[in-house]
Image (tube, helix red, strand yellow):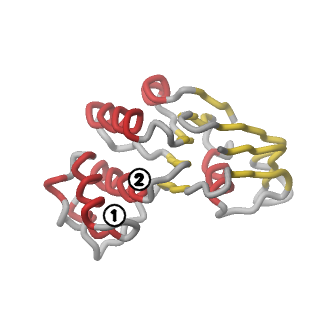
Amino acid sequence: MLTITDLSFSYTSERPILEGFSLAAARGERICIRGASGKGKTTLLRLIAGLETPQKGTIILEPGCKTAMVFQEDRLLPWLTAKGNVSLVSDDVSAVRLLTALGLGDALDAKPQTLSGGMCRRVALARALAVQPDLLLLDEAFKGIDPARKAEIFHLLQTQYRDCCILFTSHEEAEIVSFATRVVEL
């Protein structure tokens, strides 16, 4: 699904963010990328998504691999409703189904500024899932979501998206223990 070999990246020549990093990830894996702030977790996900270009090394995705990403910021369009934000990448029926599955059935017509932070995170996740990704990149995607709702989301991802390879960053040990199949330290 994903093979990273000898990856190096730096924003400045003084301090490399990633140096000689390698990783192989298969379908169905849920890999937590863990490390202290500034160690390159977000940068790694941005490199995999093609938003940054490595200075050295390779990132190879399986041919035809659909990738979706949830950023640390929700990046929702404020003039669209929850359903409208998800419908940007799917049809209305799929948007309603995903939002309802994520506990937002009563907020379909709500605009982001009227939603809580955790609700906005779930809209962003629904939008990423609407792409029907083979590879899902989640950058602190579960912050602001209460533990019970988080458990429901993990169950949804583990059952309905079990063939999707998920790479996620987290600082919360409980998230890592309950969701990751493997942990990679940076």
The C terminus lies in which quarter of the figure?
top right
Q: Amino acid at mark 2?
A: Leu
Labelled pair 2, 1 in contact (Cβ < 8 Å): no
Coordinates of residue 36 in the picture (x, y in percent): 62, 36
For this rendering, which residue is in front, 65 or 143? 65
In the orientation shown, which residue stands out farthest toward the bottom? 79
Per the model, the C-alpha gap separating discs 2 and 1 is 9 Å
Coordinates of residue 59 in the picture (x, y in percent): 75, 51
> Would you identify the image quadrant in which residue 130 lies?
bottom left
Residue indicated by mark 1: 86
In the orientation shown, which residue stands out farthest toward the left? 106
Q: Measuring 40% from the left and 67% from the top, which residue is drawn there?
A: 89
Category of crowding for the residue at label 2, using alpha-carbon neighbours closer than 10 angstroms: few (below 14), some (14–19), many (at least 20): many
In this view, 180 is above or below 123: above
Q: Measuring 41% from the left and 53% from the top, which residue is drawn there?
A: 129
Left or right of 106? Residue 15 is right
Label 1: element kind: helix
Residue indicated by mark 2: 129
